Image (tube, rainbow, N blue to C red):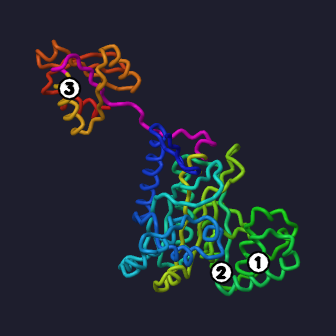
Amino acid sequence: MSFKLPRGTQDILPGEVEKWQYVESVLSDLCRRYHYKEIRTPIFEHTELFQRGVGDSTDIVQKEMYTFEDRGGRSLTLRPEGTASVVRSYVQNKLYGLPNQPTKLFYFGPMFRYERPQQGRTRQFVQFGIEALGSEDPGIDAEVIALAMNSYQELGLRSLKLVLNSLGDKESRENHRQALIEHFKPHKDELCNDCQSRLEQNPMRVLDCKKDRDHPAMKDAPSILEYLNDYSREYFEQVKAYLDQLGIPYEIDSNLVRGLDYYNHTAFEIMSEAEGFGAITTLSGGGRYNGLVEEIGGPESPGIGFALSIERLLMALEAEGVVLPIEEQLDCYIVALGDEAKKEAAGIVYQLRKAGIQVDKDYGQKKIKSQFKAADRLQSKYVLVLGEDELANKQINVKRMATGEQETIDIADVVEYMKKEFKGE
């Protein structure tokens, strides 16, 4: 019987996984510079966390969650996004009580959503996200957006567009909600089934519908910007002023609503304008979620964050022809001839690795010619040759592959010799 991986998942193989490792290292260093600390949360949580934190009216909760019952009869769900888990941990571990606020966190991890797989969209995908909790300063909104933009720019992407909107506070959203219901009610029967149910639950989600996006009623739907109260309008103006100060260009899109119920005030998406990237241009999105901490049982703690898909980031890099500076060469390869030489080579390999040098040797009983071919395939910078004559004299031959130069040294000196060679590169 043969097995294949489940639909909507992928194997990330050697040769490709190095790109992931490089991207993750760059993003981790970026977070260090912004003074965000890493957090790691469980892959599954109690289902109610996502029902309350993400929202019952969202497609994620209604259609896409992987939910199961454990042996104790508890309903658990593989996390479909990262924010709810981070906020749950923030509340449970009382991070709001730490002296340095806001609490600034970042995470990497697999997320799970049952949706139709397509290019750049899988059922298990990896997110990088950040959350800043405990501040309602418009400046932190701008910082989060800047970090999101820098995440792509640090890796070499240039064809980016930042789209911005305000969803307003509770009062503004309620006024806008009533206006949307009145606007779409005469067209209710013309909308898809999802939008018909959303119209009463969360009419703002109608604006985000992919099926009805070309419906004439969408074009003249009431804009949230027309319903912002003075506080919400001033908050949005300050966020824009900070972005202007940072020199980060943006476009305003009053129909940008995001797909999760917990957003309010600032909402944003970053899109790729690279030719050939694909029909779905969104790379990442985020926004402010004042009220989510209280919804999950914590004290009043405003928050803002964003998340990006590593898969879609790699797609964007490919679309723009960005080549990541990944080191593919091997430091050393040891060619050994004869049983005693192979034993001695094993000890040398071990000592070189302890000294921080990347080294490998043959484990397939290959002849000398085949071992040299293996060293070439691995693009080894140095080949160390240990034959019967060298072993008898307690020496080893060192060949620099770039120049062809060779030198014979004592085996006892090989570790220090190689350390100096690489230090001088």
Which residue is at the front of the view, 18 or 31?
18
Residue 231, above or below 166: below
* Image location (x, y in percent) of residue 395: 15, 19
Q: CA distance from mark 3 to mark 2?
A: 71 Å
Q: Residues within 10 Å of mark 1 (few under 14, many from 20)?
A: many
Q: Residue 258, how many percent across, how many down?
A: 66, 68
Residue 373 percent location from the top left of the image: 38, 18
Disc 3 secondary structure class: helix
Q: Amino acid at mark 2?
A: Glu
Task: Confirm whether the magenta stretch covers residue 318.
Answer: yes
Residue underneath mark 3? 345
Q: Which quadrant of the structure image shows residue 339?
A: top left
Q: Is 355 a magenta residue? A: no
Q: Amino acid at mark 3?
A: Ala
Give coordinates of residue 309: x percent, y percent. Answer: 56, 55
Q: Quadrant of residue 399?
A: top left
Q: Name the residue that disc number 1 marks.
A: 199
Find residue 234 and name its label.
2
Query: Which quadrant, please, contains the C terminus?
Result: top left
The disc, 1 or 3, on the residue closer to the chain's N-terminal end is 1
> Which residues fall within the magenta stretch?
316-341
